[in-house]
Each structure stands twice: as C-alpha cells, then as structure tokens.
Image (spheres, grey):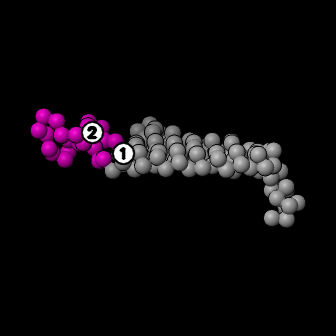
Amino acid sequence: MGNYLLLNYGEAVAMILFGIGFANLLLQNNLIKKIIGLNIMDTAVYLFLAEKGYISGRVAPIVVDGVQEVEAYINPIPSGLVLTGIVVSVSVTALMLSITIRLYRRYHTLNLDEISTLLKKEGL
C-alpha cells in the first residue's frame, strides 16, 4: 500500500488539495473564503489531470527531428482539458467576485448567514 502512495504522490496531493478546498467551501461563511476554496478544488483537478496525462520518458507532442511514433509523445488531451479548465475557472471566479462585490455593496457584509437573514427580513 505504501509503495503505491509513493508512486502516485501527485494524485495523492491532488486528492488532499481537493479535500481542503471542499472543506473550506462547506465550513466557511465568508464568501471570499468560499471562492478561495473553490479555486483550490479547481487547482486539485488540474493537478490530477496533469498527473494522469504525463508518461515518464515521453515528451510534448511536437514533432521534432522527424520522430512521428506515437510512443514518443504524451497524450495532449489532458493538457488541453487543463488549459480549457483554467480559462473557465478564471471566468467563473471573476463572475463570483463581481457578485460578491454587489452583495457587499447592498448588505455591507460578506457573511453568508447574515446575508440570508437580511434576505428573509426583506421577504425575498
């Protein structure tokens, strides 16, 4: 069991990071801290995909020196998924931060429980 953990330490770190982000997302009341937790989870997923796409002894799929054998290169799909995920993550983070700013301007707090209480008082 211990040997497998040492061989797959990248995946283990990704799972630990995901757990930290998920716990942060569930346990924090501050909206900024929740956004940070979600970004930690995103990073863990990208690390996991990068670890799964890497094959020891192979290089990026750029044809150099006429080498065209498939066995010489890594799979480019996980790298493409990570890049696409980063773009989406930045967009979602920007949207969440803009909504957080609007909530703070309206309710003068970032505490989700206080915002819920104020919403109930407003009758929304």
Q: Residue furthest left?
A: 66
Q: CA distance from mark 1 to mark 2?
A: 10 Å
Residue under label 1: 79
Mark 1 neighbour class, 10 Å CA radius: few under 14, some 14 to 19, many 20 or more: some
* Residue at 15% in and 45% down: 69
Q: Residue furthest bottom?
A: 123
Residue under label 2: 60
Give the image location of residue 14, x and y in percent.
Answer: 50, 42
- Image height check: is 6 above or below 90? above
Say whether residue 34 is left or right of residue 18: right
Q: Residue furthest right?
A: 121
Q: Secondary structure at mark 2?
A: loop
Q: Is 2 or 41 nearer to us in this picture?
A: 41
* Residue at 76% in and 45% down: 104
- Magenta stretch prevailing secondary structure: loop
- Image height check: is 124 above or below 91? below
Give the image location of residue 11, x and y in percent.
Answer: 46, 43
* Residue at 80% in and 44% down: 109
* Residue at 43% in and 41% down: 8
Q: Judge whether residue 115 can be spotted in this image.
A: yes
How many numbered circles does the render carry? 2
Q: Is 9 or 115 nearer to us in this picture?
A: 115
Identify the image quadrant of residue 30: top right
Segment tinted magenta in the rendering: 54-76
Is residue 4 found inside the magenta-colored segment of the image? no
The label on residue 106 is: none
Marks 1/2 in contact by CB < 8 Å: the verdict is yes
